[in-house]
């Protein structure tokens, strides 16, 4: 049986179409994926992302442990609440998972990892802890729920719903978080819009969801979450990168700190495995198809492949992320059902904060 979040009954009561997503019973939409997408771009949407795994890393060796475990450098985190996006890597330099790590105290960091890789990630961290003799406790927090409040009206809606919690987070800058009572409120998200991700006790999640939807947040499912993140040029683990793919070939070089003398798992592998591909955006120019993952991209430099593709509701065009040979030019063709259709190489993101950034 698929696992369920604390909001499963609320989703079913709202008429959501439920699907098995990585072993979790999750809503793909509540009637119209397109309307949910536009609600987030134009007003405010709410996502249940409680299937993602919160993991607390605690103890006197927490910073040293994460310094070793993550490709990005946690020494950048000096102010309580500051967050950092990073990958965990195999020894060979492939991506175990991507995650966000939050710093609260020298003996307490919190990471949030993907749902489908959570068990693998915890096992990986536990093995590394044992190998390194790290003085840390690794605690998966299944007693917590995560709600993502996204859209240009998210601040207003959050303030109406929970004024005291909003007041604590009012001045947060992006990629920062604050603790307020038993709530953690972060200025992070996966849509390219403003908003908050709130981590709260699972027991109060249904009431919080009810209050937030009563204050203007439209429930949105995994379908809209995927089109929104792709428009925002954000990677999806398992499609845009995995253990076979270097972050350098997935547009994630900016998340890897190779300059400091710090050693981390995968550093030697990356140094012996130089970047071989460009990770680009594509916009389909011809009619007659939709860009999808695994379609072949024909370029003057050789063959590439789409990693994520969709129809963009905001742009009303088909868009994709693709891995192509280095220095590929602006004009490419995509093989869609045996027919080569013209596409243009662009720099992602395609859409941020409601504005179309590519033509």
Image: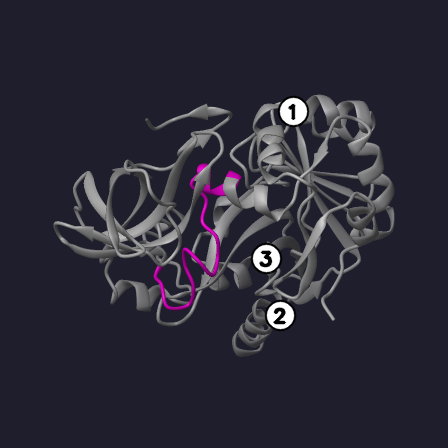
Residue 100 percent location from the top left of the image: 56, 50
Instruction: Please report the residue visible at 37 percent of the width from the left and 68 percent of the height from the top.
Output: 244
Instruction: Please report the residue visible at 57 percent of the width from the left and 71 percent of the height from the top.
Output: 120
State which tag comes first along the sequence, 1 or 3: 3
> Tell me, what colour scheme is on the image?
one colour
Residue 238 within the segment the image draws in magenta:
yes
Which structural element holds mark 1?
loop
Which stretch appears magenta?
228-246
Assign the magenta stretch its main secondary structure. loop
Q: Is residue 194 visible?
A: no
State which tag comes first along the sequence, 3 or 2: 3
- Residue identifier under label 1: 171
Which quadrant would the N terminus be assigned to in this image?
Answer: bottom right
Report the front residue among 73 and 202: 202
Location of residue 135 with respect to 100 vertically, above or below: below
Give the Cα distance between marks 1 and 3.
26 Å
- Residue identifier under label 2: 119
Crowd tier of the residue under label 3, counting other residues whose Cα lies within 10 Å: few below 14, some 14–19, many 20 or above: many
State which tag comes first along the sequence, 1 or 2: 2
Which quadrant would the C terminus be assigned to in this image?
Answer: top left
Apparent side of residue 240 relative to residue 191 in the rendered image (left or right): left
Q: Quadrant of residue 54?
A: bottom right
Give the Cα distance between marks 1 and 2.
35 Å
- Residue identifier under label 3: 113
Give the Cα distance between marks 3 and 2.
10 Å
């Amino acid at each position: 049986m698929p696992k369920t979040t604390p909001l499963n009954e609320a989703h079913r009561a709202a008429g959501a179409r439920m699907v098995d997503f990585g072993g979790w019973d999750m809503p793909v939409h509540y009637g119209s994926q397109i309307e949910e997408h536009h609600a987030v771009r134009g007003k405010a949407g709410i996502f249940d992302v409680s299937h993602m795994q919160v993991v607390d890393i605690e103890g006197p060796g927490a910073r040293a442990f994460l310094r070793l475990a993550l490709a990005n450098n946690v020494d950048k985190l000096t102010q309580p609440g500051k967050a950092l996006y990073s990958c965990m890597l195999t020894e060979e330099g492939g991506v175990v998972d991507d995650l966000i790590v939050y710093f609260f105290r020298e003996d307490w960091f919190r990471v949030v990892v993907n749902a489908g890789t959570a068990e693998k990630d915890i096992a990986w961290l536990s093995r590394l802890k044992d190998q390194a003799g790290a003085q840390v406790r690794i605690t998966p927090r299944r007693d917590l729920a995560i709600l993502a409040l996204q859209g240009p009206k998210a601040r207003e809606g959050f303030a109406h719903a929970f004024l005291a919690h909003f007041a604590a987070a009012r001045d947060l800058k992006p990629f920062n978080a604050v603790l307020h009572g038993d709530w953690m409120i972060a200025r992070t998200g996966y849509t390219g819009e403003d908003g908050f991700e709130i981590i709260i006790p699972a027991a109060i999640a249904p009431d919080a969801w009810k209050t937030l939807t009563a204050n203007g947040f439209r429930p949105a499912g995994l379908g809209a979450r995927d089109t929104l993140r792709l428009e925002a040029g954000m990677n999806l683990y398992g499609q845009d990168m995995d253990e076979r793919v270097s972050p350098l070939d997935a547009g994630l070089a900016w998340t890897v700190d190779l300059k400091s003398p710090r050693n981390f798992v995968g550093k030697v592998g990356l140094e012996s495995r130089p970047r071989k591909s460009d990770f680009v955006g594509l916009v389909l120019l011809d009619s007659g198809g939709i860009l999808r993952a695994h379609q072949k991209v024909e370029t003057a430099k050789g063959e590439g492949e789409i990693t994520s593709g969709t129809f963009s509701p905001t742009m009303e065009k088909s868009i994709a992320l693709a891995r192509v040979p280095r220095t590929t030019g602006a004009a490419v063709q995509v093989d869609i059902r045996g027919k080569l259709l013209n596409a243009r190489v662009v720099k992602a993101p395609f859409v941020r904060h409601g504005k179309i950034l590519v033509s």
